[in-house]
Amino acid sequence: AVVVTIAKNCAALTDIGVSKCDKLTDTSIMALANGCVNVRRLRMNVCDKITDASVTYLVSQCSELTDLDVRYCNKLTVATLTAVSRNCPSLLVLLFGADGCASVTDKSVSALFAGCPKLTSIQLWGCTSLTKVVLPDSITEIVDLAFYNCSSLASITVPDSVTSIGDYCFA
């Protein structure tokens, strides 16, 4: 209820953090998408009740999004990455992943890079179906845990543009 109220009354918000909100639902995310269309940075990691449907709607409404953190949102799948790749050409940072996120494939990650050409930093931890990743030249940072628990990842191409590699990236 609080998030819905914020969405109705704070249309100018550009930076929203609702991480670890165990009561956050798809209805709340859709309200944010409708009321806070200028949001640029959204952190909603560890929100177990949100699904692909609400995140897909959110990214279709919030065209200014540059930074999205949906780590540990265990109901999100490749459908979220597909929606991001189709709707977020200005995205700079994407933090995504959960234990056993098997639906994310090499092809879906390639499509993400093609649809988000400004992406500078990415985390896809727990994506157990990834086997080969070719990072685009736009990537400058490989954050902590970026490909953590991507147990099938056999090959990753790192461009010269990368200036920072974090801890436990490939563990």
Image: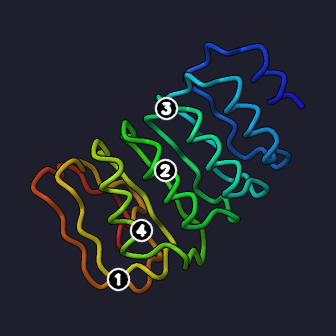
Looking at the image, which residue is at 77% across and 13% down? 9
Q: Are marks 1 and 4 in contact (CB under 8 Å)?
A: no
Q: Using the image as rendered, state which of residue 166 and residue 43 is in the foreground.
A: 43
Q: CA distance from mark 1 to mark 4?
A: 12 Å
Mark 4: few, some, or many residues within 10 Å (few <14, many ≥20)? some
Q: What's the CA distance linking mark 3 and mark 4? A: 21 Å
Label whose residue precedes the other's in the sequence (3 or 1): 3
Q: Residue at x 82, y 49 (%)?
A: 22
Q: CA distance from mark 3 to mark 1?
A: 31 Å
Q: Which residue is mark 3?
A: 63
Q: Which residue is mark 4?
A: 108
Residue neighbourhood size for the residue with mark 1, other residues' Cα within 10 Å, grouped as few (<14), some (14–19), many (≥20): some
| 108 in relation to 84, above or below | below
Spatial CA distance of label 2 from label 1 is 21 Å
Residue visible at 76% across and 32% down in the picture: 31
Q: Please say if the residues under marks 2 and 1 sit with CB atoms less than 8 Å apart.
A: no
- For the residues carrying marks 2 and 1, which lies nearer the camera in this image? 2
Of the numbered discs 2 and 3, the one sitting upstream in the chain is 3
Residue 7 is situated, as x and y percent measured from the top left of the image, at 75, 23
Which residue in the structure is indicated by mark 2?
84
Q: Which residue is mark 1?
A: 131
Give the residue type at disc 1: Thr
